[in-house]
Amino acid sequence: MPELFACLDAAYSDSTASVACALFAAWDAAVPLRVETVRQGAAPDYQPGAFYKRELPLLLAILGQLERLPDIVIVDGYVWLAGARRPGLGAMLHRALDEQARVVGVAKTRFVGATACVPVIRGTSRNPLYVSSAGIDAAAAADGVRAMHGGHRIPTLLRLVDHAARAALA
């Protein structure tokens, strides 16, 4: 069975939360096989240092609706916040999935304690993306993110799920 990839992203308003998932067949895919969205009531309030409590239930909800678990799940954020000592959203997702999927985190901003990430420059941007991972070597994950479709800093399918999650709020 060929590998299945998924990009996930969530969006929030005061009264609603949504999540989008783009499924695709290769790191460099230009278009998804399909896009799914889930909309729920308001997400829990943001808790500093516990972002996963807000977003993890949404990610699990959409993954639970798929026919099969993707082999690689790419999330907007960090897998590890301080080496392997402080799990981020991606590590929490990896655990919640019983480590059955490899998880790659792609963060747009630098988190000072996140030393287990690989900076990735894409397109003509001077600002790196910060790639961390669970179940896959960080360097291999960074190579995959570098290979993702699109000539800009943010890969095409990550941008697509960001827009789809926001559109699902309406």
Image: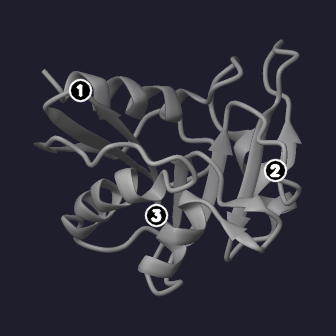
Q: Residue at x 48, y 68 (%)?
A: 93
Q: What residue sits right under mark 1 in the picture?
A: 13
Q: Is residue 4 above or below residue 97?
A: above
Q: In what element is the residue under mark 1? A: loop
Left or right of 22 in this view: 58: left
Which circle, 1 or 2, is nearer the viewer? 1
Q: What residue sits right under mark 2 in the picture?
A: 143
Q: In what element is the residue under mark 2? A: helix
Could you classify mark 3 by the number of other residues whose Cα lies within 10 Å: few (under 14), some (14-19), or many (20 or more)? some
Give, as a three-letter code, the residue at label 3.
Leu
Which circle, 1 or 3, is nearer the viewer? 1
Give, as a three-letter code, the residue at label 2.
Asp
- Inter-mark Cα distance, 1 to 3: 30 Å
The C terminus appears in which quarter of the rendering?
Answer: top left
Q: Residue at x 31, y 65 (%)?
A: 60
Could you classify mark 1 by the number of other residues whose Cα lies within 10 Å: few (under 14), some (14-19), or many (20 or more)? few
Q: Quadrant of residue 34 in the image?
A: top left
Decide if residue 145 is in sight here. Answer: yes
